Each structure stands twice: as C-alpha cells, then as structure tokens.
C-alpha cells in the first residue's frame, strides 16, 4: 500500500472517467510514488491520447456529383480527387491518425447495401495506401437522413465513438469537410475545423482542396 505524503496531495485531480477508459501505464513505470503518481503522470502527459484528423469522404477525398458519376454506390464508381491521396500521405507521414467520417444515408434509403459500402471503403483505403497514406478506419452513418441518429453529421457521434475507441484527444484534433454539417459536427466534438471549398463557412480555416489544406492543418496541429 502506498503511503500518502505531501507531494502526492498536491497532485491535481483527474477525471476518473478518463483514467478508467485507459490502460494504466503503471506496470512499466513504477516509481516510489507508486500508483497515484502513475495516475498523475498519465493525466499530465496525456501521452496516451493521440491527435487525429477526421476527414469527410465525398467532396474531400473523392468526387461526387461529377461527370464520371453522381453517387458512389459501387467501388468502381470511386474516383479520388486530385491530390487527395497525396494529402493523406503527407498527414500520415507527419504522424497523425487519420479517420474518415461519412454520412451514407443511401444505405438506409436502400441505394446500396452495407456490404457494398464496405467494399467501397476498402478501395478507398487501398487507393490511399498506394500513395503512402494510411486511413485507420472509415466510420459511416448508414441511417436514413431523417432518422434522428446521433451518428449522422452534424451530430458528433462518429467522432466521439472513434475518440473513445482509439484514445484520441478531440480538442487537439481536426475535422475537415466540404459541408457546414461537417464543420458543425467537428465543433460539437471540440475539434478544430477545416472547410474544403469556397465558403461561406464558420470553420477555423478554409482551403480549396485537401491538398491545399495540408500545410495549414499541420500548423494547426502543432
Ligand atoms: Mg462531403
Ligand atoms: Zn446514424
């Protein structure tokens, strides 16, 4: 049993919820302060919480409503936007975790099956990885647009869920999208926001494409 002493009493309070969700680092990091010191270090360093970049899919990574196809209902209908894969590669190289968060109401409406959507996302991840980028997970809301679910943007459900499962610090993360509902979702989650396209927008910053936004994104994450 560790004895309390004055040093330890000065340790800041931490949110027990945060601690309980994480794996303790105490085993590898024993000190004479023992368990409580580990808790302090855990909280203070925040080292287990990672910064993430959340990307909208349609209009940020791939074409939508373009000459080649209106909607992406099959893998072969997926065309990356110019520089998108290269942009993801740059962000990957910089060491950030990259996730896609996409509303896919077409599933709920019956335009495509979830199985097909997963194949589309496998292709997306593959096309990006060819250029050296890594998308850790593609989160999607398959519900009908008016279902009132927590996951469909502008709600923040997908971001919050990813943050819990992957130990992400939402306040140090970024959400980029080409629609105000992406920006709204990002803000609700506590993220910084990047609007892709021509405004008006309430986002923190704005760029004409993901590729053009890379430098600003990296600066914001510093
Ligand atoms: Mg979009
Ligand atoms: Zn949903």
Image (spheres, rainbow, N blue to C red):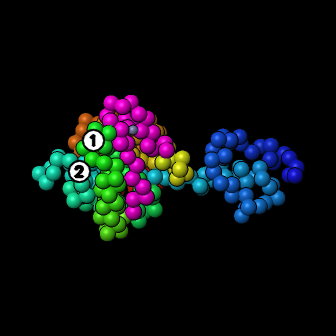
Picture coordinates of residue 5, whole percent (x, y): 86, 47
User: Vertically, is 97 above or below 161?
Assistant: below
Q: Is residue 2 visible?
A: yes
Q: Is residue 9 left or right of residue 143?
A: right
Query: 106 or 159, which lies in front?
Result: 106
Answer whether residue 222 is magenta in the image.
no
Instruction: Write down the quadrant of residue 105 in the picture.
Output: top left
User: Vertically, is 148 above or below 166?
Assistant: above
Q: How many marks?
A: 2
Picture coordinates of residue 142, whole percent (x, y): 35, 42
Q: Which residue is the site of mark 2?
A: 72
Distance Cα–Cα, label 2 vs label 1? 13 Å
Q: Is residue 89 visible?
A: no
- Under circle 2, the secondary element is loop
- Under circle 1, the secondary element is loop
Picture coordinates of residue 200, whole percent (x, y): 25, 35
Answer whether residue 152 is magenta in the image.
yes
Query: 214 or 146, which lies in front?
Result: 146
Instruction: Write down the quadrant of residue 145 in the picture.
Output: top left
Question: Magenta segment, principal secondary structure?
Answer: loop
User: Vertically, is 11 above or below 38?
Assistant: above
Give the residues drawn in magenta, as a range. Answer: 134-161
Specify which label sits upstream in the sequence, 2 or 1: 2
Give the residue drawn at x 68%, y 41%: 16
Circle 2 packing at 10 Å, graded few (<14), some (14-19), many (20+), is many
Give the residue drawn at x 32%, y 35%: 144
Numbered circle sitting on residue 110: 1
């Amino acid at each position: 049993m560790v004895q309390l002493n004055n040093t330890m009493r000065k340790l800041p309070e931490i949110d027990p919820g945060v601690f309980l969700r994480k794996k303790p680092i105490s085993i590898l990091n024993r000190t004479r302060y023992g368990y409580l010191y580990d808790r302090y270090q855990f909280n203070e360093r925040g080292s287990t919480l990672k910064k993430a970049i959340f990307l909208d899919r349609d209009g940020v990574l791939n074409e939508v409503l373009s000459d080649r196809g209106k909607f992406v209902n099959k893998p072969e209908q997926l065309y990356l936007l110019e520089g998108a894969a290269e942009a993801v590669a740059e962000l990957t190289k910089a060491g950030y975790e990259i996730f896609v968060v996409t509303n896919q109401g077409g599933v709920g409406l019956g335009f495509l099956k979830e199985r097909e959507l997963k194949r589309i996302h496998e292709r997306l991840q593959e096309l990006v990885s060819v250029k050296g980028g890594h998308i850790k997970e593609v989160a999607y809301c398959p519900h009908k647009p008016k279902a009132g679910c927590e996951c469909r943007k502008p709600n923040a459900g997908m971001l919050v869920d990813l943050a819990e499962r992957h130990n992400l610090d939402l306040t140090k993360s970024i959400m980029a999208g080409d629609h105000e509902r992406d920006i709204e979702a990002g803000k609700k989650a506590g993220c910084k926001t990047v609007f892709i396209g021509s405004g008006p927008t309430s986002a923190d910053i704005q760029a004409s494409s993901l590729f053009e936004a890379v430098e600003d994104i990296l600066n914001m994450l510093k």
